[in-house]
Amino acid sequence: MNYFQLFQLPEKFDLDLTELGSRYLRLQKQFHPDQHAAGSERDKLLAVQHTANINDAYHSLKQPLLRAEHLLALRGLKISQEQRSFTDPAFLMQQMELREQLADIEHSDDADAVIVNIEQLLQQQKKQLQQQLATALDAVSHEQDQLAAELIRKLKFFYKLEQELELIEQQLQD
Amino acid sequence: MALLQIAEPGQSAAPHQHKLAAGIDLGTTNSLVATVRSGEANTLKNTEGRDMLPSVVRYSAEGVTVGDAAMQAADNDAENTIVSVKRLMGKGYSETLALNDKVPYRLVDQQGLVAIDTALGVKNPVEVSAEILATLANTASETLGGELNGVVITVPAYFDDAQRQATKDAAKLAGLTVLRLLNEPTAAALAYGLDSGQEGVIAVYDLGGGTFDISILRLRRGVFEVLATGGDSALGGDDFDHALVSWMQQQAGVSNLSHQQMRQYLTLARSVKEQLSATDTVNFSLPGTQQQAELSRAEFNQLISPLVKKTSRACRQVLRDAGLTAADIATVVMVGGSTRVPLVRSEVAAFFGSEPLTSIDPDKVVALGAAIQANVLVGNKAEADTLLLDVIPLSLGLETMGGLTEKIIPRNTVIPVARAQEFTTFKDGQTAMALHVVQGERELVENCRSLARFELRGIPPMPAGGAHIRVTFQVDADGLLSVSAQEKSTGVQANIQVKPSYGLSDDQVADMLKGSMQYARQDMQQRLLREQQVEAERVLEAVGQALKADAALLSAAEFANIEQALAQLAKIKQGDDTAAIKAAIEHTNTLTDDFAARRMDQSIRQALKGHNVDEV
C-alpha cells in the first residue's frame, strides 16, 4: 500500500507534517469506527480495517526513519526486516565510543551534565545524517537509494542510543 | 401533506427517529446509568429515587438481589453477597489468591478462572456483572419508556484484553448491544470538554474504588487525542479501607477475622474514611470488642500515604510516555469517589502544580461522558462533531525462544491498529504452529499477562522454512484483540484455535446465555432470529442510503442487482427463517463489496479535497 497516495501527498521525503496531520484527522473523522457504531456488521468491520490502515500510514509517514523506509520500499528496496552487518569501521568505532560513554554515566559526578552533552551530540549526528538522507532520497536513483539505505541503518543506531540514554535518565530519576 | 420530499444525498428524508441509548459506568463500588435528553446528559434514578447503584449482588435462597437491597444484607450474609466484583473480571483463580483473605466471600477455581461459591451455586464475575448491567438497563428502559438500542460501557483505560472481553461478555449476557467500550478517563474528559470547551493538554486522574487510571489527553477543535495512559488496575479506595482495617485490627488485638467480622470492619473503615474528609478526628468503637479508638486525619494520611505515592509514580511514568512534563498540563480533572480524600487532592495539586478540577461530581462524570458518546454512536446526531482517538494501554507481544517477549504493538499506539508478523516453519511437513500472546511491558513472558494461546492448523506441508505464515493482530476501537493468519505462497487461510488464558470461549458464553435465569423463559431461537432481523435492518438502511447517495458509482445493471437483493432481503426478513435471513445478508454483502470499495475511494478523495488546514 502506498501511504503517500492514501493521503494524496507528493511521494517525497520532505513532507509537510502539519498538512499530513490535518489530512489524517479528516480521514479519521470519515472512517473511524465511532462513525459506524450503529451500522451493519460489515460496515463496522470495514471501518476497523480502514482506520487501522490510516493509523498505520500516519504512523509510518510521521516518523522520518519509517517514512524513508517506506519510500525505499515503494522503489523496491526493502530494508525493514533485513539482517546485514556493517562494513564501515569508522562508524562502528564511533558507536562503540558512544556506548562506553553511556556506560560511564552512572559513575560520573555530574550525571545530568553528561547526559545533556551526549544528548546534544546525538541530536547533531542525527540531524546531519537526516540531511544526507533527504538529499539521497530526492535524487531518485539506484545508487542514491543504496546510499539512503546505508544512512537509514546508521540512523537506527542513533535512535537506539537515544532510547538507551532515555532509559538511563529514567533510572537515575527513580 | 407534502407533495415533494427533498433530501440531501446520503440523508434520509424520513423524520429523524430518536434512538434510545445509555452510558453505563460499571464501577467497582457503585455503578450508574445516564442518558442524553434534550441535549443534556443526566444520570437516571431507579424507582427508589437513587442514581448510584451499589455494585453489589446477593445470591440467597430467596433469589438474586442487586444494589441497595443486596448491600443491606452484606453484614449478615457476607458470604453470598458479592462486592467489588470488578476486581475479579478477566482474572485467573491463581491470580486472585492474594485476595482470598481480603474478600468476605469464597473464591473458587472454575476451569482456571476465578468464580464465587454462593447459596445459588458457583457464579463467575461475568455473571455477577451481568446482573448489575441488567439492573441499570432496566432502570433506563423504564425511565425512557422503551428498549435500549445500544449502550456505551466504561472500563478503566488500564484494563487489559481479558478484562475488556469479560466486560463485553457480561453485557452480552445481560442482553445489551454494546456500541463501544469507552475508557473511563476519556469519558470524563468528554463530559468536561464539551461543557467548557477546553483546549490544550489535560490530565485525568481517576481513583475509584478498585482501580487507578491516569491519562493524558490533548483536546483541540473537537478532537480528543489520548497521548498516553497508565495506572494500576488493582489500586483504589478499597485499599485505603483495607489499610484502615489492618490498623483497626492492631488496635483491637485481633488477628483473624471471620467473613462477617471482615464485612463489619470494612463498613466501619469506609465510614471513618469518609468522615475524615470533613473532620480532623473520628472516634469509634471497634466491632466485637468494648474498645474505643480515635483516628486523626494526619494518622490516616500516614496509613494511606504509600498508596497515594504509588499513584504519583504512575503519573510520572505517563508524563514520560507522553513526552511531557507536569508544567505542560493545562488542566487536571478529578474522577472517582476516592479523589474526595484530602490527601489525594493535595498530592495531585502538588504534583501537577495546579488545583485540580472538581466541578462535575466525581462519581457521575464518567457515566455522563459515556451517555454523551452513546448518543453520538447510536446515530442521534447527524454527524459526530467529536472524534476520539484512543490508544492501547499495554503492549501486545508474542512469546519467543527462551521465554522472552517480542513486542508486536507497543503501548500507547492509536487504535484501531493492525500489525502483521511473519513466521516460518522449522520442520519438514510441519502443518501446525503454536503462538502465545501476552500483554505487558516486561521482557520475560512470565512477568506479562498471558492473553491467549493460538494454534495455527492447516498449514500446507512444505520443507522446513518453506511456509511463510503471516499472522495479523488487530485491535479494534474497544481495545479488543483478534488474530488471523494466512500462508503467503498458497494463500491458504490457517485455521486458528483460540484458548483465552483468562477468559471465556464463545461456546462458554453461549452456554451461559442459555443457562441464565434471564433467558430461561425466553426462547433462544427467538433471540437469535431477532438478532438477525436487526442486522438485516441495519444492512437495508446502510445500503439503501448508499444507493441514494452514490448511485452514480454503479452501472445500471449493478444498481438493479443490488436493488433486487435488497427487496429480497426485506421480504425474507419478515419471515422467521434465521438461516435464510443470514444467507440473504451475506448475499447482499458480497454483492456490494465492490460498491463499498468505490465509495471508500470516493470518500477519501472528498475528505481530502477543498479543505484548508485550519478547518480540521
Image (tube, rainbow, N blue to C red):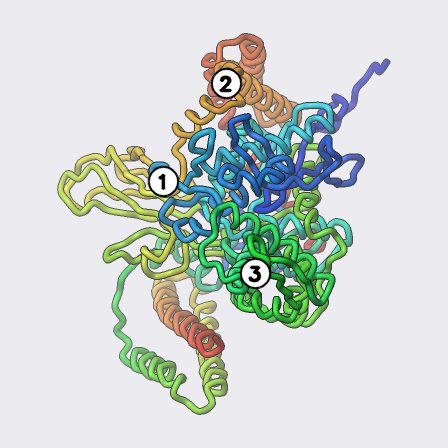
Q: In the drawing, what numbered circle is on residue B393?
A: none
Which element carries disc 3, helix, strand or loop?
A: helix
The answer to whether dots 3 and 2 both sit on one chain is yes
Above or below for B399 versus A128: above
Q: Which amino acid does label 2 sit on?
A: Ala
Q: How many numbered discs sit on the rendered protein?
A: 3
Query: Where on the picture, by quarter, is residue B485?
Result: top left
Residue B86 location (% of width, % of height): 52, 44
Q: What subunit carries mark 1?
A: B
In this rendered view, identify the residue nearer to me: B119 or A5. Answer: B119
Disc on the earlier residue, 3 or 2: 3
Residues A25 and B119: in front is: B119
Q: Which of B139 and B319 is in front in this view?
A: B139
Q: How far apart are marks 3 and 2 (CA)?
A: 43 Å
Residue visible at 34% across and 64% down?
A: A146
What SS does tag 1 mark?
strand
Q: Name the residue under label 1.
A: B109
Q: Which residue is drawn at 62% across and 22% down?
A: B541
Q: How crowded is mark 3: few (under 14 residues within 10 Å), some or many (20 or more)?
A: many
What residue is shown with label 3? B244
| Circles 1, 3 touching at the beta carbon (< 8 Å) | no
Badge nearest the viewer, 1 or 3: 3
**C-alpha gap between disc 2 and disc 1:** 25 Å
Q: Which chain carries label 3?
A: B
Farthest residue to the bottom: give it.
Answer: A109
Amino acid carrying mark 3 in the image? Leu
Seen in the picture, residue B40 relative to B564 is either above or below; the reply is: below
Q: In this view, does A164 lie to the left or right of B215?
A: left
Q: Mark 2 points at which residue?
A: B520
Q: Looking at the picture, which amino acid does disc 1 mark? A: Asp
Chain for numbered disc 2: B
Residue at the image point whose x is 84% and y is 16% from the top:
B2
